[in-house]
Image: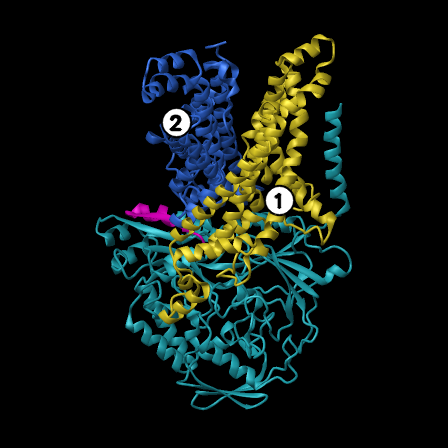
Chain colours: A yellow, B cyan, C blue
Amino acid sequence: MTLYLLKRLAVLIASTAAAAVVVFAFMALLPGDPAEIALGVNATPEAVAELRRQFGTDRPPLTQFLDWAGGLLQGDFGISYVTSSPIGPQISDRLGVTAVLVLGGMVVALVLAVPAGTFAAVHHRNPLGAAISAFSQVGIAVPAFLAGILLVFVFAVQAQALPSGGYVPISESPGEWLRSLLLPWLSLGLVQGAVLTRYVRSAVLDVMREDYLRTARAKGRGATGALWRHGLRNASIPVVTVLGLQLATLLIGAVVVERVFVIPGLGDLLLNGVAGRDLLLVQGVVMVLVAAVLLINFVVDVAYHLLDPRLR
Amino acid sequence: MRRIGIWLAAGGLLLATAACGGGGGGGGDTGGSAAQSLSVGFVAEPANLDFTSTEGAAIPQALLVNVYEGLVKLDQDGKIVPLLAEKWDVSDDRKTYTFTLRKGVKFSSGAPFTADDVVFSLDRVKTDWKLKIKSQLDVIDDVEKKDDSTAVVTLKRPSNGFLYAMATRLGAMFSRTGVDDLANKPVGTGPYVLGAWRRGDSIRLDANPSYWGTKPALSSITLKYFKDATAMNNALLTGGIDVISSVQAPESLQQFADPNRFETVEGTTNGEVVLSMNNGRPPFDDKKVRQAVRHAIDHKALLDTAWAGRGQLIGSMVPPTDPWYEDRTGDYPYDPAKAKQLLGGKTYNVKMRIPNLPYAVSSAQVVKSQLAQVGINAEIEPLEFPARWLDQVFTKGDYDLSIINHVEPRDMGIFADKSYYFRYDNPEFGKLLASADEGTEQQQIDDLKKAAKLLSDDAAADFLFLFPNLIVAKKGVTGLPKNAISESFDFTALSRQQ
Amino acid sequence: MRGRLNAGLLVGGTLVGLVTLAALVSFFWTPHDPTLVDAAQKLREPGGGYLLGADKFGRDTFSQLMVGARTTLYVGIVAVGIAAALGIPLGMIAGMTPRGWLSELIMRVNDLVFAFPALLLAVMLGAVYGPGTLTAMIAIGVATVPAFARVARAATLQVMVTDYVLAARAAGRRRPAIALRHVLPNIGSVLIVQASVSFAIAILAEAALSFLGFGTRPPTPSWGRMLQESQELLFSTPRLALWPGLAIALAVLGFNLLGDGLRDFLDPKLRRIRAER
């Protein structure tokens, strides 16, 4: 296990380094010199050269990369060309918001999917189980932003029960914080819950076909009880994998929900950066998103190894 | 049974939290003392707070008159009125302006405002400003301090535009000790100071306790930024904000029809929504092709479909609030047959590079459909606004057609600059503008009328419509500016009735 | 079990068939020009040649939906095509040389590409080349490569230990020949299922991108953009949002059901290798 962990850790570090190279190279492709963009049409060549020197974009690409990557290791993302403020704190603020949004959404998804999927599996032959399956298919087919728009319409505009958007930091008012996040959590959670329900169902179905469970049932114990005692760990393996996949895609995927609910998250910061040609900011946000996905994959792989006795 | 329990718990949580917040939203506008504050929804968030080096209307909109003040300002009718100057005297040759400054004015940093700051601020336009519009003050020859409360500005030649430019952001007064971090820490003399800036979300302006003039009725104003028009509408419907500063989805106005809850203010702006044509390269270097475009567009239908019929058809680059306004919509009546004839049966493929803003995306689809009828196939390419559009269209001039709302006041002069992205080049036009600037008030009006007609005749661009000032507010909010004819959204008169 | 028609296959096939039919017919005929602005028909109620009414530009909703189906299929086909063309060979190579350095490299690069989700890639590509259908398709396609590679690898690993492959290897057949003759036909059904599921995801991704303004350019009809444009009229004219919303949901549902149905229909044994979302 230790050996596996070390090996997997080495892969994580190597991948992250490779990702940094890819991200940096990609941003170098972007047309437009930041200094020229910042100075506009009337800029003199001297002014542009001076600003390039200030930004450090006059140095060779390799030096720039090493400088940037070195800064990243110390949590320094540089200073934005456009807002002339440090990028790191902005990213960490936004990452915090997106993390709360995505994790809350996943909790909602789990709370819905585990019971619903298990029920649908145990009762897969009766109409209620089939109905849950069918319902989850429909849920998967609804885009998250459409779910968000509908939730706003019903709960905010019609019922006037919850705010239609905006985000209140928990430090300002815990109650308002919760209220501002309920609908976004629901719109992510409902859709992701539908996806998850199907995986839970088929994982539980697979486990139920295993011999030890049949034996347990033959001994006269209830199916649910046997499942609870023996099947949970086995059924959780594919579910954990899917959970990781969902988390990974949601970090950026949540941007549509951030747009609908006016939540200042990481995806929103990325879109602003792109619109404002804040290249260093875009570079930083992309790097954080990619590194987060790599980290999630790492955790999932390790969890996989811990859960699956055959792999230990 | 357990599963049903979970559902109930989730539902209960929803109801409980919904109940504890009462009717208010995220704007924090409930309760007694909070009545002193107001939150206003805006579309574009400033990239930073430095309007001396960063383009974009969002910065002066938030800060000018509210945080920064000039010697003069524009009132609601477009008249120039005193602000930091009590009065000003103009010499007989109209080249020397003597400003008598208000006494006892302090910057929010505590530093007193004197004639030294006037010299400093106006010199700084020349030395440090990076915006194209700074050329409007090129006419200044010299700025001098006579005494602490008297500043004298000498011009190279008489100019009608000078005082007007002084009412824009160019005339904003900065403290000699307050320009170190303009991007984040504005220091002005205005009734409000920067309270807090939650990037990507909102800017809070707090009342300036040491303001020299009438203290504002509100203790704070929150400018909340929305990229999505629908999200902004929803925020007003649910109490998240109190005012929509500029409606971006005019079709949705009937949501706010209930007079017991909302009030709609409709006025005019300085914003000419222009269909720009690149005069500098084929096919729009050919006047006939440009004229064909103007005949091919059914402006009434465009306004009705693209912007719900709100706004006004003007036909040239002059808004009705300027003294030299004339209705020029008759110059090129909708006439597809005439357009085809002007094109001589030829067809064209052109690129329409537009900013990805609601009015532009809407208008572009109508323009495309109407141009297709006469044989011009325009491919729409939405570019992110501001940066990408500014870079490709505005700076590099790499476009055939574009659509943009030119919001700067009295901005017809941009056509006189042939390096401007229109690439319009007619020396006659430049001469008219120069003589208008130097001449008497009446001559200014006459010349600018001629200039507007020339612009229209030359089909230098097509003028789609005048952008409406559409404000929706909760009932009881007073002091909203009916017309948006300056660069700023003036908060000073804003208050809320109980 | 093999070959038995099931409900999923029938419903999914019907929905996908309808979308395809609408798209194909739209090449030859739509009731109206879907991009023609006609102020006289602004927000026209359904009826009289306008089956589902018209939008604020007076454009016929039904015609727009038909051409929108074309955009949807176009994005799906190209995106899935890119993903399959790159992902399947890579996955097969990795599966046929499970202990080799090449396999290791492929799967590591695969994990790296996986760290760039479709939306992120589309925003990045959009920043360089400008948003549009093509950038959206490429972004979605590249981001889907890892899913195909993983499924192809897993299926290949299973096929490689079957008797006939072992026999072929013993007989000295070269790897490319084995890949073409034995592996590909046997993993085909899994890949078809994967294609169907990926198609559904591509549709959702395109809708999300259009919603953000990074997708199909106006005025080309796209269901995602129709939905986005109809937002301001959600209160007064909800049908404008209803139809494109329904179209997206039904198309996604169709492709998902088709995928599930095909899996059961083609080869129940391969159920263990699940399509990757």
| CA–CA distance in space, label 2 to label 1 | 37 Å
The reply to whether residue A153 is in sight is no
Answer left or right for B195 relative to B71. right
Q: Which residue is mark 1?
A: A99
| Label 2: element kind | helix
Answer left or right for C17 relative to B429. right
Q: Amino acid at mark 2?
A: Ile
Quick check: is B378 in the magenta stretch?
yes
Q: Nearer the viewer, residue A169 or B204?
A: A169
Are there few (<14), some (14-19), or many (20+) residues within 10 Å of tag 2?
many
Indicate the position of residue A125 as horizontal and vertical percent values: 63, 13
Indicate the position of residue B289 as horizontal and vertical percent values: 27, 56
User: How many numbered circles are shown?
Assistant: 2
The label shown at residue C93 is 2
Q: Residue at x 47, y 53 (%)?
A: A275
Q: Amino acid at mark 1?
A: Ala
- The picture quadrant where one finds residue B224 is bottom right
In the image, are marks 2 and 1 on the same chain? no
Extent of the magenta region: B367-385
Q: Which chain does tag 1 point to?
A: A
